[in-house]
Image (cartoon, rainbow, N blue to C red):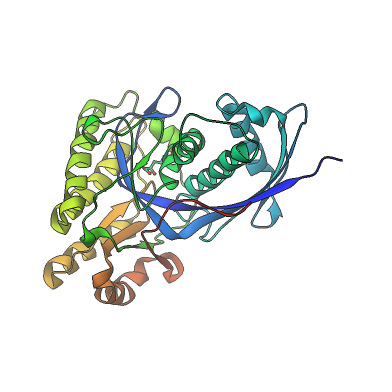
Amino acid sequence: MVSRKHISVQAPSNIAFVKYWGKTGRQYPINPSVSMTLKKCYTGCQISYCEGVDALSVDEFLFSGAKNEKFRKRIETYLHDIAQEMPMLNNLSLAIETENTFPHSAGIASSASAFAAIAYGLVHIEQELGIEAEQTIEQRASMLARLGSGSAGRSIAGPYTIWGDFTPEQSHNDFATEIKGIHPEFHQVKDAILLIDRQEKKVSSSAGHKLMENHPYRQARIEQAQDHTVRIIQAMRSGDWDCFGKILENDALALHSLMMTSDPSFILLAPNSLAVIARIRDFRETQNVPVYFTIDAGPNIHLIYPKSHEIQVEKFIEEELVSFCEDRKYIIDECGSGARILHA
Ligand code: PMV
C-alpha cells in the first residue's frame, strides 16, 4: 500500500494599501499593488498526499472541520488549472483541510490566505519529491497562489509586499516580493477591522475586475495606482505617516469610486462605513493621532495606525465606533510575517 504523507502550513491574510483592481491574461494585474501581511488573521492548512496515481484528485476537502463540496470543487478546478505550472499534480491524490482564525465572509480576504497556504504547501511537497524549480520557494508559491486569487500572491512574504510589473521597484506580474528598506516608524503597524456588515459580497471580485476592461477611468486608474505605489513606498521608507495616510485613504476611495462608476454600477459601502470615515477624520484632526482608514471590496473599515498610538485609537474605537459595527464586532490585528510550514 502506498503511504500518505502530511504537511501543515499557515498563511496570513493581507490588506492592500494600493489596490489591485482589473486584470488581464493569466491573472496579471493591470496596475501595481502594495499590501501589508496580517498576523492573527490567517488560514491553517493540512495537506495529505499520495503519489503515483493516474490522475489528480482531491478526495476530501474539510473547511473548519466539516466537509464542503463547494470549496472542494473550487480547489479541484484550481489544482487542475495550475497543473500546467506544476505537473506533479497530475499524479497526486490529495486531502486538504483548512480553517481560518477569522470569520468567513467578514470582508477579510479569506481566499487570499487559503490559496497562499495551499500554494505554499504544494511548493514544499514539490521540494520533498525532489522536483527542481527555477524560482525561489517564495516566488513560486506566490505565483501559484496568484493563480487562485490575485491578491493571494501577496500573502506569501511579509510584512509589506508589492505585486505587478513596475520598473521603479523592479517588481513582477508573476509574483509578489517583499518591500525592503521600511522605516522603523512602519515596523509595528496595527489594523483594526470594523465589521460593519458581515453579509456576503454582492459582487464577486472576479466580476469587479472584469468591469475594469471597458471602464472609462481605466487608464487614469493605472496611472494613479503607479503614482500611489511610488509615493506610498517612499512614505513607508521615510517614516512619513501623514503622506502615507493621505495616499492610503485616497486609494481606497478610488477603488470604491471605480465600482460606483462602472457599468453596471455597484456600491459596496454602507451608511455606517461613511459615518465611521467621518469620525476617523474628525478624531485624527482634533486629537492629532495618526490613524487612517482603508477599505477592501466591502463595507468594512480598516483603521491603520502605529502601535505607539494603540491605546488612544483602541479607546476611540470602543467609545465611538463599535456602535456602527454589526453586533459591535471588530478584530484587532497587526503586521506580520509571511507564510510558514508548521510541520512536514
Ligand atoms: O484577489 P481578488 O481577485 O479577490 O481581488 C482582490 C481585490 C481587492 O481586494 C479589492 C484589492 C486588493 O488589492 O486586495
Left or right: 331 with respect to 118? left
Left or right: 238 with respect to 327? left
Percent across and percent down for residue 134 are 48, 29
Percent across and percent down for residue 231 are 17, 43
Percent across and percent down for residue 107 are 44, 53
Quadrant placement of the N terminus: top right
Query: Farthest right residue?
Result: 1
Badge count: 0
In the displayed structure, 163 sits above or below 103; it is above
Residue shown at 48%/51% (left/top)? Answer: 339
Left or right: 174 with respect to 314? right
Seen from the viewer's position, the closer of residues 162 and 310 is 162
Seen from the viewer's position, the closer of residues 314 and 144 is 144
Q: Quadrant of residue 118?
A: top right
In the displayed structure, 80 sits above or below 124; it is above
In the displayed structure, 325 sits above or below 177; it is below
Left or right: 72 with respect to 19? right
Residue shown at 21%/56% (left/top)? Answer: 183
Q: Quadrant of ligand 1?
A: top left
Q: Quadrant of residue 331?
A: bottom left
Seen from the viewer's position, the closer of residues 246 and 210 is 246
